[in-house]
Amino acid sequence: MAEAGAERLRAAAADLLAPEGLVADLTAALVAEPTHLARDGGFVAPGWDPELDETRALRDEGRRVIAGLEATYRADTGIGALKIRHNSVLGYFGETPAGHTAKMTGPPLDAVFRHRQTTANQVRFTTAELSDLETRILTAAARAQALEMAVFRALSEAVLDVAAPLQALARALAEIDVSMGLADLARGEGWVRPRMTRDRRFQIIGGRHPVVAAALRKTGGQTFVANDCDLSAEARPLWLLTGPNMAGKSTFLRQNALIAILAQMGAFVPASRAEIGVVDQVFSRVGAADDLARGRSTFMVEMVETAAILNQAGPRALVILDEIGRGTATYDGLSIAWATLEHLHEVNGCRALFATHYHELTALDQRLNGLRNVTMAVREHEGQVIFLHEVQEGAADRSYGVQVARLAGLPTDVVERARAVLDRLESADRGQGAQVLIDDLPLFRAAPAAPPPAPAETPLRDRLVSVAPAALSPREALDLVYELKALADDPG
């Protein structure tokens, strides 16, 4: 089978060869690095058009050309003092001392050299060749551009004459380029060939985000944590994903969408194993952006995109939704997220990953038989939150927003105040009235930072305080190191 495929490739390649004459002409006519715009010129290689080469020489080396003509005239007349000069009135003209007037104006030189002006010391003349050269020098730049454009048009026509085979060649090379790039990725990154099915299966084992995984490896940081995802009917095709920010929810959503797209296009995928039923649509509502020029707030953009998904997604679609309803009031947002989740389950019936901070939605798994609760695993250690980046069964009990705020560098008094407010709000959810809660919470105030404790008096500290570093000799500094070491080792 492989030999038959190779034979077909060779047969197809024979029909995809660019015309040899055109390739040779383009190689000879164009410089290695042409200008971006034809009107800038300089793209025709030297030697392709003799007239263009001559015009360029006049444009770029006019002084040298004039000097060559001057040497020719000296040889023809035998007058070593003959010079070709230029001024704004006469343009280019020949000039000899006045003593040569009779020779320059008499036969046989008068047939070539036409008298123009005589001064007290000089006689000036011109020739048909010098007049023509002057015209060509003055128009050389425009002429060179016109000649280059003529070459460009001729080459363009030659390309258009074989446009169909060239387009076929370009398409073939593009496919080869993409295939080789994907093959190189698959081999280098350990990707696997997905098994495509005609049902609605979606089972990813050890899935990875190709870009994030490569970035982590490049920076020498932590290893990417692979995760499974099973949206098959028997495993429930709608996953509700909860967990804190920075725990990896968005990455998990995106990596599964990318794996689905890669599989659909015939590529290997970043996973240990993958079985995917045909996905005819991929919808994504991730991130926050506004469209102020069209009068759309961030929340309005979010709602427009969500509406497009709910109105278009079919049973074979894959949908990823991240934080629906977060751009408005809490209960409004929760209500929208709740209704969206139900619509995906009951109406669209598609495979979907739905990430949210609304923990109230997790109770819907009791009513929606296709909904499955999963969460990002975290651990707390000595007040620190540790993100494990693992997707596991269950629901998050909280979002750890205050901890993330602390990690982001919010002032300590802000973090502590937020923690106090959070405790009271959670107490309100357990039965206290909202007004009682508000009345009970004191206004925000920044508590003055406690002064740092005074350092303990120790022999080691006393000795360090007494040291004048600038006054120490190298030997004294070494002796001091040993002395301090002894004081540090002394438990008394």
Image (tube, rainbow, N blue to C red):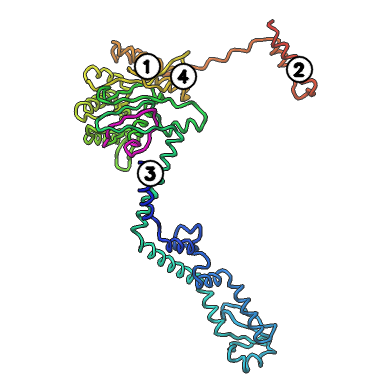
Q: Closer to the N terminus: mark 3 or mark 4?
A: 3
Q: For this rendering, which residue is in front, 49 or 340? A: 49
Whether residue 487 is visible, yes or no, is yes
Cα–Cα gap, marks 1 and 3: 68 Å
Closer mark to the observer between disc 1 and disc 3: 3
Q: Quadrant of the C terminus?
A: top right
Query: Is residue 369 left or right of 472 when viewed as pictured?
Result: left
Residue 80 place in picture, x, y as percent: 70, 83
In the rendering, at what x and y percent does residue 39 appear? 44, 63
Q: Amino acid type of disc 4?
A: Asp
**Residue 121 image position (x, y, % from top left):** 68, 86
Numbered circle sitting on residue 413: 4
Mark 1 or mark 2: name the one nearer the start of the chain.
Answer: 1
The crowd level at tag 4 (other Cα within 10 Å; few <14, some 14-19, many 20+) is some
Tag 4, which secondary structure?
helix
Query: Which of the pair 18/413 is nearer the observer?
Result: 18
List the single residue furthest toward the top: 492
| Amino acid of disc 2 | Leu
- Which residue position holds label 3? 3
Circle 3 sits in a helix, a strand or a loop, which is it? Answer: helix
Give SS at disc 1.
helix
Dot 4 or dot 2, earlier in sequence: 4
First in residue order: circle 4 vs circle 1: 4
Q: Which residue is mark 2?
A: 480
Amino acid at the residue labelled 1:
Leu
Q: Which residues are magenta?
A: 261-280
The residue at 71%/13% (across/down) is 462
Label at residue 422: 1
